[in-house]
Image: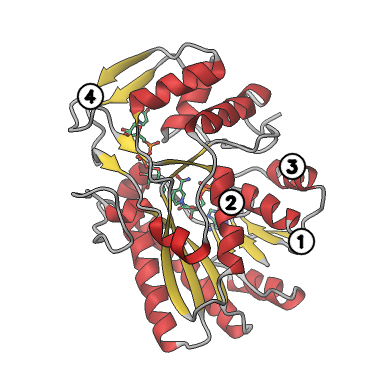
Amino acid sequence: MLITGGAGFIGSHTCVELLRTGHEVVVLDDHSNSSPEALERIAKVAGRPLAATYVADVRDRRSLNAVFTAHPIDAVIHFAAKKAVGESVRIPLAYYDINVGGTMALVSAMHDHGVHRLVFSSSCSIYGNATTVPLTEESPAAPTNPYASTKWACERALADLCQHTPELRVSALRYFNPVGAHPTGLLGEDPRGMPNNIMPFLTQIAVGRREELKVFGDDYPTPDGTGVRDYIHVVDVADGHRVALDHIDDEPGMHVFNLGTGRGTSVLDLLRTFEEASGRPIPYSVTGRRPGDVAELVADPARVAAAWGWSARRDLAAMCRDAWNFQEQNPYGYAP
Ligand code: NAD
Ligand code: WQD
C-alpha cells in the first residue's frame, strides 16, 4: 500500500490504522507541510515500522516509478496536497499544479505499473455555499475558491478516467472538518505558522501561544449566529480509509462518500466543549465574517453507513480532549 502525504495530519493517523490492521505501508511525502518526526511516531504508536519512506514530490515521475518498481503496491491512498483556502486564492496556479498535477502524475504512474485501486482525499469544501443542509453526495458542487476547485477538478477527472478504464476503482472521500489527535498524544495537528483552522487555534490559546479566539461573525442564520460545521475525529477519518480499502473491490468505477458525523456544532458550542475538556478558559471576541465562509456545512452520512455499515464513533468531547492532550504534551508540535 502506498500513502502519499503519509506524514501529514490525516495521513499519519491513517498509517497507524493500516499498520495496526496488518497492511504493509510505504509513505511518500515531501515534508512541505509535515515533519519527518511524525513518521517515527507512527511506528511507535502502531508498534510496527513502515515498510519504506520516500522524501519526494508526488509530481516527480521518477520517484513514483522508483516506488512502484521497488514495492508490491496493491492500492494507493492519496493525501498529498496543499490545503489552505486563503493561500489558494493568492497562488491558485500552485494549487492546480500540486493538487491536480500531482493527482494526474500519480494516477499515470499507477496505470504504468498496473495498480488500479485509489482512495482520494476530497473535501466538503466542494459543496461551497450550500443552500440546504445536511449535504448528501448528490448536493450540487459549487466550489468558491481555487483549493475547492482543485478537489472538484480531481473528482471529475477521476470519474471520467473510471468510465473509460474498466479496471480502475476509486473511492473519493469528502471529509468535513477533521479535528482531534491520536489518544496517545503522540500524533496530532501541527500547522506551520498561524493556524488556518479553529481547533489548532483553540489548542494554541490553551497552551499559551496565542491570546484569544476571534470568532468570525455572530450574525449567521444559525441558532447562536456563529458558523456551524460537522467536526469529525481524525481517528474516525483514518478508520474510514481502512474500511474504504476493505470495500474498494465491491463495485467497479468511482464512488463518492461523505465522511462526517451528521451533527452540526457552532463556534461557541465548540469553544465551550473545548474549555470543559481542557479545563482552560478561552478568551474570545467577535469580529466580522471571514471572507468566503459559509453559515453551515453538515454532512448527511447515510450513504457510507448503507454501503459499508460504517459511521463515525467519537464525539465532540473526545475530539477536544485528544486535540488538547496532543498540544499539552507537544506545546510546539513536532519541533523539539
Ligand atoms: P497535511 O498538510 O497535514 O498533509 C498533507 C501532506 O502531504 C503533508 O505531509 C505534506 O508535506 C504532503 N505534501 C504536500 N504536497 C506534497 C507534494 N507535492 N508531494 C509530496 N507530499 C506533499 O494535510 P491533511 O489535513 O492531513 O490533509 C490531507 C488531505 O486531506 C489533503 O489532500 C487535504 O486537501 C484533504 N482534506 C483535508 C481536510 C482538513 O481539514 N484537514 C479536509 C478535507 C480534505
Ligand atoms: C470552522 C469555523 C469559522 C477560525 C476548512 C476548509 C475546508 C476543509 C476544512 C480542507 C468557521 C470559524 C475559524 C477562527 C473562527 N479543509 N473560525 N475563528 O473553514 O469550515 O473549513 O477546513 O478541505 O476546505 O475551508 O474550517 O476550522 O477554518 O473554521 O471563528 O480563528 O470556525 O468561521 O465557522 P472551515 P475552520
Helix, strand, or loop for circle 4? Answer: loop
Query: Which residue occupies 50% across, 32% down?
Result: 193
Q: Is residue 315 visible?
A: yes
Select label 3 or label 2 by which is in front: 2
For badge 2, the amino acid type reads Ala
For badge 4, the amino acid type reads Asp
**Quadrant hosting ligand 2:** top left
Residue identifier under label 4: 218
Residue identifier under label 2: 238
For badge 1, the amino acid type reads Gly
Compared to 220, does 272 lie above or below? above
- The CA distance from mark 1 to mark 2 is 15 Å
Helix, strand, or loop for circle 1? Answer: loop
- The CA distance from mark 1 to mark 3 is 17 Å
For badge 3, the amino acid type reads Arg
Select label 3 or label 4 by which is in front: 4
